[in-house]
Amino acid sequence: MSARKTTPVRRTADQNSPLRQPLAGDIPLSQIIDAQVREGELYERLPDGKVHCYACAHHCTINPGGRGICQVRYNLKGMLYVPWGYVAALQCDPTEKKPFFHVYPGSDTLTFGMLGCDMRCAFCHNWDISQAMRDSYAGRPPEPLTPEQMVEAAKRSGARCVASSYNEPLITSEWAMAVFKPAKAAGFTCLYVSNGNATREALEYIRPYTDGYKIDLKTMNDKNYRKLGAPLDHILDGIRMVHAMGFWLEIVTLVIPGFNDSDGELRDAAQFIKGLSPDIPWHVTAFHKDYKMRDPDNTSARTLLRATEIGYGEGLRYVYPGNLPGQVGEHENTCCPNCHALLIARTGYVILDYQLTGDGTCPRCQTPIAGIWPKSRDEVRMGTAGALWFRRPRGI
């Protein structure tokens, strides 16, 4: 399956279901995925048949027959049921697409997603799966798969990593760990691509099997964050916990004109990241019109370069403007923060040159470069600028 958009599933009503209808009024889709569940692990039972779900920082208390904010975790007769045994999107992506720039450059990542999200971002480019139970125009039929089939697909595709992405992985963590456990045993590096609305319990649950964690820091304005579905403090706390617990962390800010692109807000984001560690890569990426956000202009290269300068000015060591390959000059590259030697040359998802040592240090001054690196340059897939349009996601 690929992550491309598909024809939406149309809705009709069913009055016989023991569960409250999803916000979208969906029945055909919910009948399918409501049956593809298992009892969850990230919850506790409460009196009167209620449950407390702590898969994400919403901490939903769910009445019998009710659904969490995500719409896909539900309470049936005092037990929390969670998504299991399917994918709504599956493809092999360049690892840089996640984006992870400091995890095995040039590698591929088998990436899977399910349905549902705990947020409602108006600019989501995966809205057809993330908003499947909230928007009647979203949704695609799920495809049943086992964890073992996923691992075999990763092997066949030549992937180095396996990632849970496309929708919000926190709300499907039980299934992600069912995949990650055999994936780790088979030698894969496992990754989360998340909105960061995390709880300590969920992070402790996934930590033994999850190596890297990418978080979207969407804005530093609490009012704007709440419009997307969560308080700012929840995300900042999630970022702090991910870093403190030792996941490899990279942060992305989709820079949207008129929404979060002021110098002050970008500076606030850079200062927050620097306060945790200057070694955390910050990706400032270009917005394009999508889903319900059609008014702002697409982000220009000039705006991304301004954000990049702000990040470096606040003391970050690795700031990467993204989504505009070939338009931001040398800033797609990784350079040594000490001697400024060129260590990794990139254009888009293509690695043009790789000079890190097997220990992940600068060959000129021996400065350690934070990340998850290959042991040898020979392991790195490299190409030319002409390969840019061929280094793309591959269907499974």
Image (cartoon, rainbow, N blue to C red):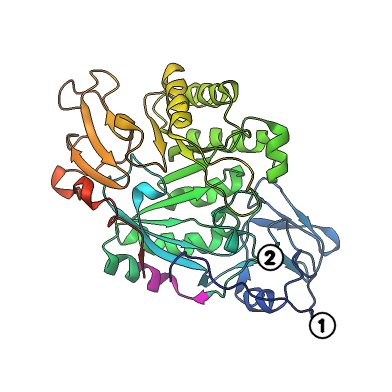
Percent x, y of residue 29: 65, 75
Q: Quadrant of residue 218?
A: top right
Measured from the top left, where is residue 332 in percent x and y? 32, 35
Residue located at (33% from left, 39% from top): 102
In this figure, what is the number of numbered marks? 2
Kindly identify which residue carries mark 2. 133
Q: As rendered, which of 363 and 208 lies closer to the eye? A: 363
Residues packed near mark 2 inside 10 Å, few (<14), some (14 to 19) or many (20 plus) = many
Residue type at mark 1? Asn
In the image, the segment drawn in magenta is 143-151
Left or right side of 148 for 47: right
- Residue 6, by quadrant, is bottom right
Q: Is residue 358 left or right of residue 194?
A: left
Q: Is residue 311 above or below residue 239?
A: above
Judging depth in this view, the residue of 44 and 340 nearest the camera is 340
Foreground tag (2 vs 1): 2
Location of the N terminus (image quadrant): bottom left
Q: Amino acid at mark 2?
A: Met
Quadrant of the image for the C terminus?
bottom left
Question: Which residue is label 1 attached to?
Answer: 16
Distance between the Cα atoms at labels 2 and 1?
A: 18 Å
Q: Residues within 10 Å of mark 1 (few under 14, many from 20)?
A: few
Q: Is residue 255 above or below residue 167?
A: above
Residue at left offset 44%, top offset 64%: 179
Q: Is 276 covered by the magenta stretch?
A: no
Task: Tell me which residue sits at (63%, 56%) in the image.
Answer: 117
Secondary structure at badge 2 equals loop
The residue tagged with tag 1: helix, strand or loop? Answer: loop
